[in-house]
Amino acid sequence: MASNTKIKNLRKLLKKRSERTKCRFTRARVYAIDWKDVATLQKMISQQGKIYGQKRTGTRSHFQRKLKTAIKRARFMALLPYVGR
């Protein structure tokens, strides 16, 4: 039988894990990703200009699709680079 401290530690671990893996857009209660918000979009692309995947950023698939579209629009409007420096 597990002691109370082990149960408490397990609960803390599960709570931290769920907070970490939650999507940043879900946490901020964002409904639409704006292509003009360059600061947010830059966090989602690498130095070479590649879009990070869902596993790396932790975004939900719904927002990952919107993010892809927003990054492509920002690139077209020359707010983000197509390729890195």
Image (cartoon, rainbow, N blue to C red):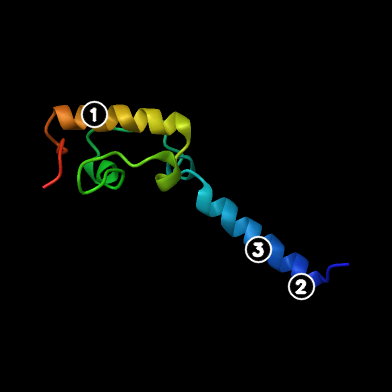
Give SS at disc 3: helix
Relative to 25, 15 lies left or right: right
Q: CA distance from mark 3 to mark 1?
A: 39 Å
Residue 70, quarter of the rendered image: top left
Quick one: label 1 or label 2, which is nearer the N terminus?
A: 2
Which residue position holds label 1? Answer: 72
Do the numbered discs 3 and 1 sit on residues whose CB atoms are within 8 Å? no
State yes or no: discs 1 and 2 in contact (Cβ < 8 Å).
no
Q: Earlier in the sequence, mark 3 or mark 1?
A: 3
* Residue indicated by mark 2: 5
3 or 2: tag closer to the N-terminus: 2
Q: Where is the N terminus found, in terms of image quarters?
A: bottom right
Which residue is drawn at the image coordinates 20% and 32% (left, top)?
Answer: 74
Asked whether, in this view, residue 62 is left or right of residue 66, the answer is: right
Q: Amino acid at mark 1?
A: Lys
Point out residue 45 in the picture as x, y percentages from the top left corner: 27, 43
